[in-house]
Amino acid sequence: MNNSPLVSIVVVTYNSSKYITETLDSIAKQTYNNIEVIISDDFSTDNTTELCEKWLSDNKGNFVRGILLKSDRNTGISANLNRGYLACNGEWVKEIAGDDLLLPDAIKDNIDYIQNCSEAKFVFSDRKEFKIIENGMVDVLKAQKYSRDYFYTLSPADQYWDLVIRNVCIFSCTAFINKDVFFKLGGYDETIP
């Protein structure tokens, strides 16, 4: 895949059995193909890990790599995310929770953006809030914009100040992060579980 960086999708789970299959299926439907799936489970007490193992087995040919990491105790989301990042081989990481869904072009759109904006190291986007209705169908409750449209015309330095001063909301579920920069900044603070 010329010019197509490997993307690691880190799925953090904890007692996520109710939605984990739909989350993983949304990854399988991505239009971007150079993906590895890292599932990091934080000592679930339901059947989340069994569902993940089955899904990984059923979908093993669809990805560069797929693994399930299991913690021997509950450590909190910060440590769970760090475990996932440590297992990544990708240049870029998309992190989602076990009850999130990705739109089919989510990874492709992020890759297109970073290829057109080489100085970007952290990318955040709009999101859609949803609920699952009958038979796994999704009902979109509302679309939420990351910020006001002018934000995207600002330089990185001005975007930073806009975030700090105006308290613009960043949706963590939309994070697309350069792995090297993530580790240079020290990863997630595990004292905040």
Image (cartoon, helix red, strand yellow):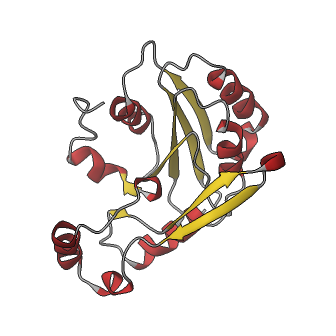
Left or right of residue 153, residue 90 in this image? right
The spot of residue 36 in percent (x, y) is: 57, 44
Depth check, front residue: 22 or 116: 22
Is the residue 14 above or below the residue 45 in the image? below
**Quarter in which the C terminus is drawn:** top left
Image quarter in which the N terminus is found: bottom right
Q: Is residue 139 left or right of residue 7?
A: right
Q: Is residue 127 above or below residue 14?
A: below
Q: Quadrant of residue 88?
A: top left
Residue positioned 41% across, 59% down in the render:
171
Residue 179 sits above or below residue 153 on the image: above
Residue 116 appears in the figure: yes
Q: Residue at x 21, y 72 (%)?
A: 166
- Whether residue 2 is visible to the viewer of this picture, yes or no, is no
**What x and y, as percent, mark residue 38?**
54, 37
Q: How many marks?
A: 0
Q: Nearer the viewer, residue 12 or 7?
A: 12
Q: Is residue 15 above or below residue 112?
A: above
Spot the residue most to the top: 72
Residue 155 placement, left or right of 67: left
Q: Is residue 154 left or right of residue 93?
A: left
